[in-house]
Image: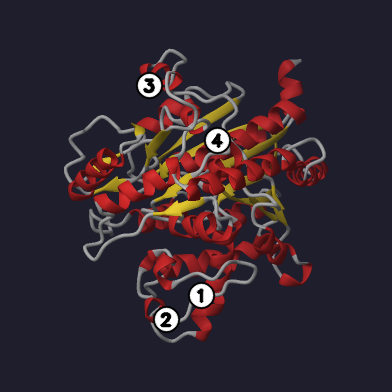
Amino acid sequence: MENCKDLQKPHIVILPVPGMGHLIPLIEFANRLIDNYGFAFTIVIPSFGFPMMAIRSFLETISKTIDVVYLPPVSFDDHPNDVNAMTRIMVGSVRCIPALRDLVKVLKETTRLVALLVDLTYTDTVDVAKEFGLLQFIFVSSSAMFLSTFFYMLELDETCSCEHRELTEPVKIPGCVPLQIVDLPIMFKDRKNETYKWILYHARRYILADGLIVNSFLDLEPGALKVLMEESSGKPAIYPIGPLLQSSPTGVGHQHDCLRWLDEQPPASVLLICFGSSGTISPEQLTELAFGLEMSGQRFLWVVRIPSKNAANGVYFTTEATDRLEGSCPIVGGTRYWRVSSMGCPFLVWPLFGDQDINAVILSEDLKIALRLKKNKNELVGREEIAKGVKGLIAGQDGKLIRKRVRDLKDAAAMATSQDGSSTKSISKIIEILENHKTKLS
């Protein structure tokens, strides 16, 4: 009987980009649909040659009702060994599709499979979805502004003949705060780069999706979301459902030494330093950071990964063991902006890669809930700049104003995810589409 009931559950396949910032909100979305609507999920983890220990450890802690499948490694034999991470993701996202198709075929025969829920770089899954009569939703774990940048690149590529890094005027993406060229992520600047070509490829294919699910909410990015959601835009339906945060943080025990120490400190007096699961800084920058923290005279917790034999070219940090900390500490690093909006903590932004430059602009210039650290002529954030920023955030007048704004935003995030909130209503629309999708067992 139990197997028969399972066959009646709408089943969804999740395909994330390997990375905790992508994985956590997708798992949280799955948990909500499991707990509130009785859905079933299979999460598919591709292998693009990145370290997988943190991901495997995290997946061991998730609900046993979510099946986990690891795809075979993708071959990059036709690329140099030092191919950059973004190109590896873009190429791998296409090359893993045959293995995904084989899995989907099996699931279609054994479950009530209704949809594929995939990350931004898996637009080729639309062909798999069509073949098996499934819906395809694309999940945007970053900001609505980041998604808008993808779409805007299509227009900019047609109207601009020079390299984008040579532009002298700010990039004006509809509905978004103007973006200085220096803040345009590197993958959008170099038109000759393989990653840039993949960005245009995927941006053109987003319109083929049945919907774009964005981990943001209307009060956080009203301008960008309004433009994206306009029916005349020619884009698929946009569903802002955020913020999605890990409901049961793992990776740190209640009796961890750092938490006991934190409990002994005055409220809002400790800075949390964390650069994310893929953040890398040079030894020179590490030295500046250490001296800057000391010069600031402020309390801090610094989350670092245990050194490994692969860490010769830099110092690697991880978000493991920080979820509970982020709820109570001002933060410095590359943490996703939706964490900041939900936890009510001020932020000292230090973008390193990917979408973090855009997130830094949103936080510091649009929402004004963060201070931004500036690099010097040597492309380092100097110790004086770090000390100034830390003191300003913890003890300065700017920090006080930011705390007020971020508390208001925390309330708005709670409202968006409440029973009658805008994000909850978006999820209800998605559920209705999924439950009404006609699918048959093969």
The secondary structure type at the circle numbered 4 is: strand
Mark closer to the observer (4, 3): 3
Mark closer to the observer (2, 4): 2
Is 92 above or below relative to 36?
Answer: below
Question: Which residue does the numbered mark 2 point to in the structure image?
Answer: 167
Question: Which residue does the numbered mark 1 point to in the structure image?
Answer: 171
Query: Sequence-wise, which precedes: disc 3 or disc 1?
Result: 1
Q: Amino acid at mark 2?
A: Leu
Q: Quadrant of the N terminus?
A: top right
Label placed on residue 43: 4
Is there a contact, CB below 8 Å, between mark 1 and mark 2?
yes
Q: Is residue 110 visible?
A: no
Q: Position of residue 24 (x, y in %)?
A: 53, 36
**C-alpha gap between disc 1 and disc 2:** 8 Å
Q: Quadrant of the C terminus?
A: top right
Question: Which residue does the numbered mark 3 point to in the structure image?
Answer: 258
Query: Sequence-wise, which precedes: disc 4 or disc 3?
Result: 4
Q: Is residue 118 left or right of residue 7?
A: left
**C-alpha gap between disc 2 and disc 3:** 46 Å
Tell me which residue sits at (53%, 48%) in the image.
337
- Quarter of the image for residue 321 reads top left
Is 163 above or below relative to 436?
Answer: below
**C-alpha gap between disc 2 and disc 4:** 41 Å
Q: Position of residue 267 (x, y in %)?
A: 49, 28
Mark closer to the observer (2, 3): 3
Mark closer to the observer (1, 4): 1
Mark closer to the observer (3, 1): 3
Q: Amino acid at mark 1?
A: Val
Q: Amino acid at mark 4?
A: Ile
